[in-house]
Image: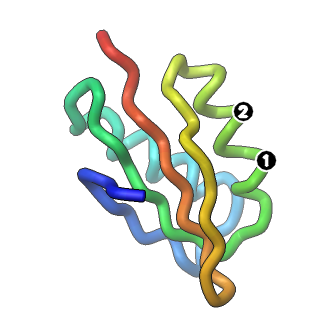
Amino acid sequence: MKADVTVDCLGLYCPMPIVHTARKMKEMQPGQVLEVVADDEGIKEDMPNWAKMTGNEFLGIEEEGGKLHVFVKKAQS
């Protein structure tokens, strides 16, 4: 999947990947896609829930060599 912005959360554990995601999303334009690279399995549940709570669109997760690539689209304002 193609992302406009990537944030590296490798080695970070709950809640830090969500904290970094929220910070980065504030800098992004509506419709842009954020890729969060993480290795904390908790993100599989946390990110869809966070996206739903904030009105952003959870696009999916791709797993590659122990890394999770999570994609979220910023909501239209």
Quadrant assignment, res 6: bottom left
Question: In the rendered image, which quarter contains the C terminus?
Answer: top left
Residue at the location (73% across, 45% down)? 46
The amino acid marked with disc number 1 is Glu
The amino acid marked with disc number 2 is Asn
Residue at the location (41% across, 35% down)? 73
Residue 57, percent from left and from top: 52, 29
Q: Is residue 47 left or right of residue 10?
A: right
Residue 41, percent from left and from top: 77, 67
Q: Is residue 40 left or right of residue 10?
A: right
Quadrant assignment, res 75: top left
Disc 2 target residue: 49
Name the colour scheme: rainbow
Residue 38, percent from left and from top: 58, 70
- Label number found at residue 36: none
Could you classify mark 2 by the number of other residues whose Cα lies within 10 Å: few (under 14), some (14-19), or many (20 or more)? few
Labels 2 & 1 near each other (Cβ < 8 A): yes
Secondary structure at numbered mark 1? helix
Q: Is residue 75 above or below residue 65?
A: above
Residues 44 and 21: in front is 44
Q: Is residue 73 left or right of residue 50?
A: left
The furthest residue to the top: 77
Residue at the location (57% across, 48% down)? 18
Residue at the location (42% across, 70% down)? 8
Residue 40, percent from left and from top: 71, 70
Q: Is residue 48 above or below residue 53?
A: below
Disc 1 target residue: 45
Question: In the rendered image, which quarter contains the N terminus?
Answer: bottom left
Residues 76 and 27: in front is 76
Could you classify mark 1 by the number of other residues whose Cα lies within 10 Å: few (under 14), some (14-19), or many (20 or more)? few
